[in-house]
Amino acid sequence: MTTRCLYLALSTGQNIANVLPILELAEPGDRVLWIESATAARRGWSEGALQVLADQYGADVIRETLVDDEPASVFRLLAGHPALATAERRCLILNGGTKPQMLAAQAALGPVGLEWAYNLEAPCGLERFPAGAADTARPAVYARHRVDLPDILRCGGREIERGTGERIWPGVWREPAPSYGRDPALTAATHAAWHVYKRWGKVQEGQEHEECLEKAAARNPELATRVPYDELPTLVPKRMRSFKRVIGRGREVNDVMAREIYNSSQGLALAGREAWLRRGVQSPPDVGMDFEGAVRARVLGWLDGRPDYAGLMQSVWRNVKVCRSEDQRGSLAEIDCGLVLRNGVVLNLECKSYEADLKDLNSRLAELQRAASRPAEMAVCMPLFTGFADQGWFAPMAARAEKLRAWRYFQLLPFTLEGQPESYKDFRGEEVRVDTFEQALEAWLRRYLPPGSRR
């Protein structure tokens, strides 16, 4: 039986790069010769990739396993392989194996009638060499394959945890955009409330003596209003009884003495955070979900107006938790807002509305790259509202952004309000320019555009 084209791939730990050129170029009647080294076979690198080839293409795969990792083994296998004799054309996928193994494969196949194909990381696309080493690269864009996030994860031995993950683009689905991020007054009020709440909580934690609490009240006048002594038995009865026993050295004192001591200490030590909350001073709403929704809405709106960038995308996902294929009991990685490029690169927009810990981010990036292949990237979205630079909560916000800019492995995507000032003055009095969210997103993704279309 004659094969129109035989695609040859050497298994690797990043098999999505092998799979994409095959699925983009192959036609019915073509075959795949898939070669595993001993290391690849031992680590099971091929299983997910071969499943994707079968599901997407119904590929006729010839699977060969080498006894070791030596280039000579690759040469011997290919030099006399019967599948080569019946193939009208041969295409070698350059992304797999080690460099010595790939050189051995080329030597065994010879230069005549050998095409090369190579999946590019950046720009997003595919390079073809119809005459192998005798030809120059002919860039092409991906247009045919249907590989998406579940397939990419499967190639890495991972999958989307049940009950999580939703594909939100392309399509007509849209979640309602939250008022946060669109209404400046509401957005500012949310961060002001969080600022007060976080500072109060940090002062309170493990520090109930009067001096510390009085300093907290001086920094946060809105918290200094005293809870009346008569409300305490209802609000915090256990704390009240404990207070009376402590000041009575083990015996509960009467209300006259307890009231005098309580009032002389500004009432803050005993009332504490619990009393404030029970009195109706509630903690602000969890801004995290609204912030993630606001980021997604901006991303989708930007894609609708930028066909050049939309052409790079296979899909956009939200709220994905990644687990091992054989274990659905615990997530290994999370994707807040995931952009899946047509060349298989997964980009995660990690949304941090308040804090960002470097150790945590490093761990998230490492697991993302294990699950979705090494070229996967992560940018951190943080709010930076320069129109409120005169507010007390802005300085810590700006400090967090400056700290993130110093971390070389993460791109900062400042989440901005429409029409906000282009810059602010930092604590040194120096002017700091802030790109809009859309400008920062474009700067991050520009290298994936074809060279001729970059601006």
Image (spheres, rainbow, N blue to C red):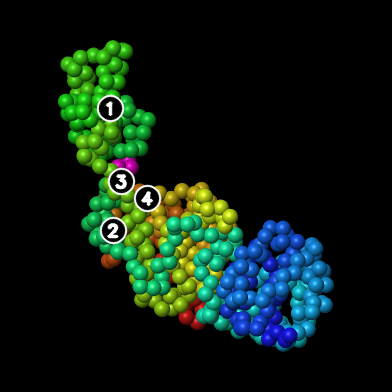
Say which mark, if any, is on residue 354: 4
Relative to residue 355, is residue 210 depicted above or below?
above
**Looking at numbered disc 2 in the image, what kind of residue is underneath it?**
Tyr
Q: Please tell me which of labels 4 and 2 falls first in the chain.
A: 2
Q: How many marks?
A: 4
Mark 2 Cα-neighbour bin, 10 Å: few <14, some 14–19, many ≥20: many
The residue identified by callout 1 is: 269
Question: Mark 2 and 3 residues: CB-CB less than 8 Å, in contact?
Answer: no
Near-viewer residue (81 or 258): 81
Mark 4 falls on what kind of element?
loop
**Tag nearer the camera, 2 or 3:** 2
Which amino acid type is marked by label 1? Ala
Q: CA–CA distance between discs 4 and 2?
A: 14 Å
In this rendering, the label closer to the viewer, 4 or 2: 2
Rounded to the nearest angstrom, the CA distance separating label 2 from label 3 is 16 Å
Let me know if residue 4 appears in the view.
Answer: yes
Q: Which residues are magenta?
A: 195-199
